[in-house]
Structure formats: C-alpha cells, structure tokens
Image (spheres, helix red, strand yellow):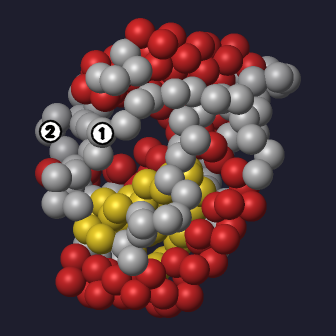
C-alpha cells in the first residue's frame, strides 16, 4: 500500500469520477449497500487533496463474505490489514465495533480509489459524513467557516511536503487534526440541526 503522498489542487473531474465508480458499486452491491457516498477531501469543492477518490459504502452488517463476493466481479479485493479506523481521543470507551470497517483495494487499472465499507449508524460511518459536510459548509474560497477548510488544506500540504514517503508520520499528525475539526463539526451539527443528505448513489 506504499505510495508517495502528494497534495494537488482541486480537480473538477473528481465528482464525475466518483459517480462512475459509485454507479458500478451500486450495480454490484444492490440492496447490500444502504448508502454509497463520496467522502474525503476530493468530495469537498475547492479543497486540495491526494488524487484518490474515497468512497464509503454503508451496510446493515459487516458481512465480509457477502460483500467480498458481491465486489469480486468488479475486481475489488478485501485488505485485512485495514480493519478499523482511528479512534478519536475521548472515544476510547466506545465498543470496538463502532470503529470497525472493511477496506477494499481497487481493481488493477482503475484510478486510485479507497473503498471503505462501514456499518450504518456506527460512529465511524457518521464521522466520515459529518467531516465531509462540515468542510463543504466551510469552503476554501468563501463562507463563514472558510478558515477551517483552508487551515486543514495547509496542514495536509505541509505534511505531504515534510513526509512524502512516510505514511505513518503523515497520519500520526493528520488524524489528530481531523479530530479537532470533527469536534468543531459536532458543535456545528448541533447548532444547525444537521442530518446527512441522501446517499450520493
């Protein structure tokens, strides 16, 4: 899974690239997928990001055999080495399943894609959507919360410059920064009555 970390300017093609990937996933997964969402920085207009499309599939249960079987015809392969998400400070008392997931490698020849399968209603499934939606409400170029998204972009750019070959160092800093952002996002969610929009696919 090693690769050089590079943060690039926002690419207007990213939403359409997600739509193509999401459509194929929807056809393959059918009713197994309760939601299929474009998440991560490529899902936030104007935000610099790694050129990787992050996709979250929400399912009723993390049935690895059923999901793996459904995705196999597309060429996705489960990676056992990435079976849980970072747990934010203060959430250590959560049940372990709140942060469990299935992670799939994209098929050979497909543009770089990270496919995260999480159980609907779990903490990590909500985290990904709230983080994305808060940054969408905080665009880099405008808006009341512009400083949040802009600062987040600067942190990622600095980390990629300082640790382009060291993913562990990159995420050792990036994950706590995300936790600071999600803390602000939780307060924003209460203030605005936030609920996730309909599934992207």
| Residue picked out by circle 2 | 93
**Occupied quadrant, residue 51:** top right
Name the residue located 54 percent from the left edge and 36 percent from the top edge: 50
Residue 28 lies, in percent from the top left, at: 48, 87
Are the residues flagged by discs 1 and 2 in contact, CB closer than 8 Å? Answer: no
The answer to which of marks 1 and 2 sits earlier in the sequence is: 1
Q: Is residue 182 depicted above or below 79 in this figure? A: above
Q: Secondary structure at mark 2?
A: loop
- Can residue 198 be seen from the camera position used here? no
Residue 107 lies, in percent from the top left, at: 42, 69
Residue 75 lies, in percent from the top left, at: 39, 77
Residue 145 lies, in percent from the top left, at: 72, 21
Name the residue located 68 percent from the left edge and 40 percent from the top edge: 44
**Occupied quadrant, residue 80:** bottom left
Question: Looking at this view, is 154 or 108 the one in front?
Answer: 108
Q: Secondary structure at mark 1?
A: loop
Question: Looking at this view, is 183 or 21 the one in front?
Answer: 21
- Choose mark 1 or mark 2, whichever is in front: 1
Q: Is residue 2 depicted above or below 110 in this figure? A: above
| Residue picked out by circle 1 | 2
């Amino acid at each position: 899974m090693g690769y050089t970390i590079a943060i690039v300017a926002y690419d207007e093609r990213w939403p359409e690239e997600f739509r193509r990937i999401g459509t194929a996933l929807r056809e393959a997964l059918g009713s197994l997928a309760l939601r299929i969402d474009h998440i991560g920085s490529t899902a936030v207009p104007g935000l610099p990001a790694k050129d990787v499309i992050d996709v979250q599939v929400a399912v009723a249960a993390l049935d690895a055999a059923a999901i793996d079987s459904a995705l196999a015809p597309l060429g996705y392969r489960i990676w056992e080495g990435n079976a849980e998400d970072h747990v934010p400070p203060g959430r250590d008392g959560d049940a372990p399943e709140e942060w469990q997931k299935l992670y799939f490698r994209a098929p050979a020849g497909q543009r770089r894609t990270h496919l995260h399968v999480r159980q609907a209603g779990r903490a990590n499934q909500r985290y990904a959507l709230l983080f994305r939606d808060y940054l969408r409400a905080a665009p880099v170029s405008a808006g009341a919360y512009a400083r949040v998204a802009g600062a987040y972009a600067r942190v990622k750019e600095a980390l990629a410059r300082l640790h382009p070959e060291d993913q562990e160092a990159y995420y050792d800093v990036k994950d706590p920064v995300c936790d600071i952002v999600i803390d602000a996002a939780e307060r924003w969610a209460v203030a605005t009555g936030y609920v996730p929009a309909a599934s992207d696919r």
